[in-house]
Image: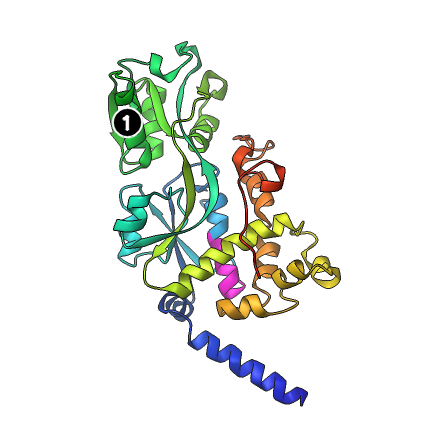
Amino acid sequence: MKRAVLAAACVMGVASAAQAGPTLDAVRARGQLVCGIHTGVAGFALPDSRGAWQGMDVDLCRGLAVAIFNDANKVRFVPLSSSTRFTALGSGEVDVLFRTSTQTMLRDTTLGLRHVATYFYDGHGFLVRGDMNVRRVRDMGGATICVLQGTTNEQVTADYFRSVNVPFQPVVFERTDQAAAALQSGRCDAFGSDASQLAAVRSTMPDPAQWQVMPERFSKEPYGAYVRRGDEDWFELVRWYTYAVIEAEEQGVNRDNVAEMRRTSTNPNTRRLLGVTPELGQSLKIDPLWAVNVIRAIGNYGELYNRHFGENTPIGLPRGPNNLWTNGGLMYALPLR
């Protein structure tokens, strides 16, 4: 009887893999996930001194490769500019986009793409030289402001100055490093972008103390992965993978204790997450131990945040809205059951 049950389970596993959506099937056949990331911004995606990509978005790509292959190295990174990222995803150049991309209504309804799940909450701000002596952004009348082409920040900057009837001169760049260089050289008076990216730029300046991210925020910028429309299996896999990383922190599961938690926890939610009962992995058509493997490889959401933005990093960005909902933030995993 046990042999029959085991054989049936194996058949079901093979059938589930065969019935996966076209993107997951293509990724498996290729033996590699292709992930679109930023061209370079500290904290999210930036090559280290050896040329290896590091950052939260990079780790989320690696974690997704682990969920599929149980191998963090089975991913190829494709750096994409703000103006080319959605075209690259839509054309099939990449399988998924983890690239500081805000969910907006028009992006969700007109690009043939789907925002998956929010993994970072941000807001538009401005980076200025500390000796500029301005208290409010509206006091920067006539300022020259660096913005990035094809971003929500380009629109938010224009909308704000227009709304307060204050003139400004935009200077548009393709890449963050170009805008940062222009700001540092004095070509721009300010850089308008999301606060996390401004803090990242500030951390890479020769003298970060000379620069300040002004405290005002002018937009809501919820970052999430994007996938192509029409493949529900792939959408669901990327979505619930993202939530699992957040759920792990909610349940106190981390890189150090994941094996012990799987062995000893009596919490039904933890047991489901960690594959003691296999239904979550089966529903996604992947290994029932996918979440264990992911957490062991990249950690939970809090570990990801602290590694790339925490107080012991050059960026040192307080979690704020990226705290768990139980700690006064907005980060919240939908129920994995």
- Residue 184 in the image: state x and y as whole percent: 36, 21
Q: Which residue is mark 1?
A: 159
Please report the bounds of the magenta region as a residue range.
61-70
- SS state under label 1: helix
Question: Where is the C terminus found, in terms of image quarters?
Answer: bottom right
* Residue at 29% across, 50% down: 109
Residue situated furthest right in the rendering: 264
Task: Classify residue 276 by image quadrant.
Answer: bottom right
Relative to the observer, which residue lies in front, 205 or 308? 308
- Residue 123 in the image: state x and y as whole percent: 42, 32
Does residue 300 appear to the left or right of 59 in the view shown?
A: right
Q: Amino acid at mark 1?
A: Asp
- Residue 50 in the image: state x and y as whole percent: 48, 44
Relative to the observer, which residue lies in front, 240 or 199? 240
* Residue at 49% across, 44% down: 56
Say whether residue 155 is magenta.
no
Does residue 278 appear to the left or right of 40 in the view shown?
A: right
Count every numbered label the image shows and give the total.
1
* Residue at 39% across, 39% down: 40
